[in-house]
Structures are given as C-alpha cells and as structure tokens.
C-alpha cells in the first residue's frame, strides 16, 4: 500500500522539493536514516525532506518505510526513514526490513542517529555499520537535552576515534541540521572523488 502524506507544519519550507524536479547533476543520491526507536529520526527526516513523502509497506511485509526527497546544497537526495533497529543482527521484522534496505539499496550515505543522553548504549550499532563497510555519518541528536543534564560530548574526538564525520543536532529546534546536510554532501563528494 502506498500513500502520500503532507505535514502541514512543514508547508512552505524552503527545502521542499517537488518530485518532478530534476537534480542539478542528473543523479539522485540516496541517504538512509537508521537508529534505535525514539532517537529523533523522523524529526530529522521531516526537516531534510519537507512536506511531501511517500509511505509504503516494504514488499512482503507490513512494515512501513518512509521516503522523501531533499535538496542539500544543489544536490538532490532520496531520504529513507527506516524502522528502528538496535543491531544489524535482526530480531524483529522491523530490524530485518532495515537491514535488507541497507544492503539492497546501496545508499550513498547512512546517517546513524543516536540519542546523546544514551550514547554509550547506541555506539555498538555504529561499529556494526562500519564493520559492514557502510558509508556512515553519526548524528548525535538531543544534544540540548544532554547538555541540560550536564553532559558534555566531544564530537571532534568522537569523530577522530570512529574515523567518520560526527554531527551534533537538536532536531526538534532545528539546531545542527544545516551542518548535517553539509557533512552529508562533503562526505559523499569525498567518497566518489
């Protein structure tokens, strides 16, 4: 089943992209959002894509996958919001669908969204994604809530340790989302160069 949803709160967003527009370079790149449930993936998805999205069940399942498009610095990305997952070793149908998406759709970039308040619990999935050879950017979301708890996270040091870009966001207040877009574009350009 396929349905189009519109989020009225995002109507008029400058980042909106109608599906009939052609990308600047003729090729749409693919970005897949992954992460545990309740880390803010959907908020980030809405900010990256604007109001027009397609929600459909993954073939052969009842699991919904949300797709949309967004323009990042003159480049068009298909953005896929996946069901929550804790590990690349699936237990639930949702995790199986996400794992299948990651390996069948060959994304240009995988954005792993984690909760800054529970960073240590979520990094094992980051390591699994890297060990699987996927092109990963880590987004440490809810930085505002972590800072309110007195928690400080050295994103630069974390990036050095992991060897991947790390971006801090507070998606509900749109903080850091432009940095995320910039990191995605730079990372993908470096990978194809």
Image (cartoon, rainbow, N blue to C red):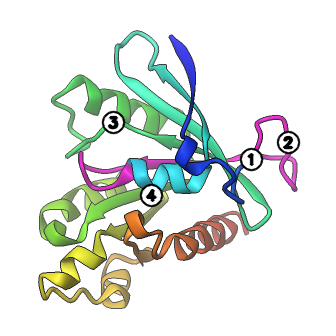
Q: Which residues are magenta?
A: 18-41
As drawn, 61 above or below 140: above
As drawn, 99 above or below 32: above
- Please state if 72 lies on the left or on the right of 85 as rendered: right
**Element type at marker 3?**
loop
Q: Which residue is mark 1?
A: 17
Residue pictured at 56% horizontal, 19% vertical: 3
| Dot 4 crowding, Cα within 10 Å, few <14, some 14–19, many 20+ | many
**Which label's residue is closer to the chain start, 4 or 2?**
2
Residue pictured at 46% horizontal, 14% vertical: 59
**Which label's residue is closer to the chain start, 3 or 2?**
2
Q: Which residue is mark 2?
A: 21
Q: Which mark is residue 111?
A: 4
Q: Which residue is mark 3?
A: 83
19 inside magenta stretch? yes
For this rendering, which residue is in front, 117 or 58? 117
Q: Main secondary structure of the magenta part?
A: loop
Residue 94 in the image: state x and y as whole percent. Answer: 28, 28
Viewer-nearest of discs 4 and 2: 2
Viewer-nearest of discs 1 and 4: 1
Tell me if residue 18 can be seen. Answer: yes
**Mark pair 4, 2: CA separation:** 24 Å
**Mark pair 4, 3: CA separation:** 13 Å
Residue 150 in the image: state x and y as whole percent. Answer: 13, 88
**Element type at marker 4?**
strand
Residue pictured at 83% horizontal, 49% vertical: 23
- Please state if 91 lies on the left or on the right of 24 as rendered: left
Residue 26 in the image: state x and y as whole percent. Answer: 87, 47
């Amino acid at each position: 089943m396929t349905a189009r949803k519109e989020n009225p709160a995002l109507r008029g967003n400058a980042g909106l992209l109608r599906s009939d527009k052609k990308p600047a370079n003729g090729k749409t790149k693919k970005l897949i959002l992954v992460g545990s449930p309740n880390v803010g993936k959907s908020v980030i998805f809405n900010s990256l894509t604007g109001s027009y999205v397609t929600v459909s069940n993954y073939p052969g399942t009842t699991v919904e996958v949300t797709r949309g498009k967004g323009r990042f610095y003159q480049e068009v990305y298909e953005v896929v919001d996946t069901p929550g997952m804790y590990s690349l070793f699936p237990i639930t149908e949702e995790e199986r669908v996400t794992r299948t998406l990651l390996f069948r759709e060959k994304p240009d970039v995988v954005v792993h969204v984690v909760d800054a308040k529970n960073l240590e619990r979520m990094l094992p999935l980051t390591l699994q994604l890297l060990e699987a050879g996927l092109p990963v950017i880590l987004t440490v979301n809810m930085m505002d809530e972590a800072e309110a708890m007195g928690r400080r996270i050295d994103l630069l040091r974390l990036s050095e340790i992991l060897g991947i870009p790390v971006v801090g966001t507070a998606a509900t207040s749109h903080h850091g989302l432009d940095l995320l877009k910039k990191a995605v574009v730079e990372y993908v350009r470096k990978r194809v160069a």
